[in-house]
Image (tube, coloured by chain):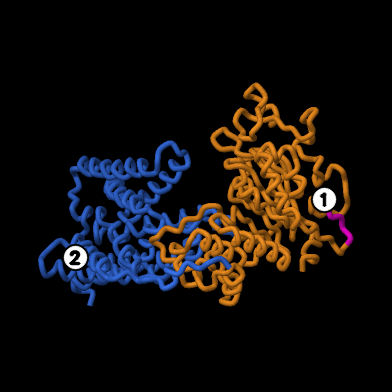
Amino acid sequence: MLQTSTRTLQPLVSLAGVGVRRQGRWLVRGVEFSISPGEIVTLIGPNGSGKSTTAKTAIGVLKADEGRVERKAGLKVGYVPQKLAVDWTMPLTVDRLMTLTSPLKGAEIDSALEATGIRHLARAEVQHLSGGEFQRALLARAIARKPDLLVLDEPVQGVDFSGEIALYDLIKTIRNTTGCGILLISHDLHVVMAETDTVICLNGHVCCRGTPETVSQSPEYQRLFGARAGQTLAFYNHHHDNTHLPDGRVLHADGSITDDCRPDDGHHPVDILPDGGRAGPMRLGHVHGPNCGCGHEAPRGADSQERRDA
Amino acid sequence: MLDDFFMRALVAGVGLAVTAGPLGCFVVWRRMAYFGDTMAHSALLGVALSLLMNVNLLLSVFVVAATVSVLLLLLQKRGTLSTDALLGILSHATLAIGLVMVSFMTWVRIDLVGFLFGDILAVSRADVDLVWGGGILVTFAIIWMWRPLIASTVNPELAEAEGMQPEKTRLVFMLLMALVIAIAMKIVGILLITSLLIIPAATARRFSTSPEIMAVLASVVGALAVVGGLFGSLKFDTPSGPSIVVAALGLFILSLLTKPRTSGVAASEGGPA
């Protein structure tokens, strides 16, 4: 099934030079990526780095102030937002939550609840669920409608460790069986899943990108999250199993799929800078604003961010 | 049957309560109680404008209430003041302007108390038709938009991501509310309209297991309150509008005394799969 859907060359969604500005401040800028059917793209980055903003822009909830967002016509999205609080005054069972945006058959609801392991909670009110159970319910709701693109904004928040592994396994299974594209947001850096094809590290701009391995080893990433983050990530790397495609197309080192291989196609670890590698002697360096939280010193001059962005 | 003034009052009141039930649920779910109050208060400005320009009362009230809600949306987007403060300004400003305008128009004699607290016993045959006609329109609109309404109440971003238009839904919802306020003004009065939206919905919450059940139950509770209030008003010779609200409050208090429905699964926190 995966093979047939990845044959579609048109990406589900693609962003080119996207920036979103609120009250004169750029939340994110220069974001470029695309998601094809069967591909898992993970956005990581510290709090306030524009992960959710980027995801919302990709699915059209926010409008890009610059750049271009293209979505496949009739794209069906399944969305798990980062925050969702159901007012206690609304009586809403897990069952009813499933059909929030589209009608579903009883069997479709059951299998989604079964897959996320909360079938026994079908009749529970969502306000009574624990954080982890509620996340599973939201995930079940998003997958039950069989989307082309699944957008998961920190889907494992509040889920315990073994549950986390189970949910990531489930996400992988969903991708493998339905061939949908997945945009995953995580700040749990140590659990960036090995199944991810492309990791994009955001910090107001694209810091670095690549496979989980290349990103975890990139100095950029280690500066952003500290050297230990790379080690913990490595723990997951040995789970990483690069699948190869039977149809003869090129599978890049970062797991993305193209018809041919060019050095500048953005799938190579060298191509880490969003602006085409204009960052001076150190290939992986970028120029920071005064307090970008990267853990290393910003260059003098507060206009450095502007200079890079200009 | 509708020749009797009391019968007309009953039919009109029940019609209004049935319409207000589902709408009131959304007011409660979306935490828009104060918003509803603001729209209702602006109705007096509508009354004053209708008298001043000699236009249809219902139309004038509807237009003013709708304008106030759109104005609020625009002011919210500018984001300089909290919604709470904006509502406080709009609510009392429209009420005060309405009162001032009415006092200037010495050439008209209007029953201010009737507008503020309603005069359900004075509803005409035409009013009954209006309540039921408008009520059926509003109810059908709500049924037609039910799924997007619920979805955007739970989370507008989720609704939008999955192909709905929460902004449009919100706008239509506000127009429906303006319409119900225009219709309800004569029955329970400007100051009491929101209670007929909120109290039945709040009462229905404890007995509901789904939004749909809550919407229907709110209509039933509202209808009971109208019947109880009207008979009480007849028996004790009390003003009809406030009597209906008191009856609704009585039902709400009764609902608090009943044992809350325990959700069987809620207690068992399921472990991870």
Asked whether residue A249 is drawn in magenta, I would say yes
User: In the rendered image, is residue B142 in sight?
Assistant: yes
Q: Is the magenta stretch mostly helix, strand or loop?
A: loop
Q: In which quarter of the image is residue B120?
A: bottom left
- Shown in orange, the chain is A
Residue type at mark 2: give it.
Answer: Leu
Residue in the picture at 59% in, 56% down? A155
Give me the residue at 38% from left, 54% from top: B31
Distance from disc 2 to disc 1, alpha carbons, whole Å, reads 80 Å
Subunit of label 2: B
Seen in the picture, residue B214 relative to A196 is either above or below; the reply is below
Q: Which of A117 and B59 is in front in this view?
A: A117
**Foreground: A121 or A85?**
A121
Give the residue at mark 2: B121
Residue B172 x/y as whole percent: 46, 57
Residue B172: give its label.
Answer: none
Which shade is chain B?
Answer: blue
Q: Residue B238 colored magenta?
A: no
Q: What residue type is labelled 1?
A: Ala
Numbered circles on residues, count = 2
Q: Report the residue at 76% width, 49% height from top.
A: A211
Task: Find numbered disc 1 in the image and state the secondary structure of the residue it sits on.
Answer: loop
In the rendered image, which residue does mark 1 sit on?
A253
Using residue A285 as the reference point, say whether residue B5 is left or right of it. left
Q: Is residue A293 left or right of residue B5?
A: right
Q: Which of B142 and B264 is in front in this view?
A: B264
Q: Is mark 2 on a helix, strand or loop?
A: helix
Establish if A241 lies above or below B221. Answer: above
| Residue extent of the magenta highlight | A248-252
Q: Is residue B143 visible?
A: no
Q: Mark 1 lies on which chain?
A: A
Q: In which quarter of the image is the N terminus of chain A?
A: bottom right
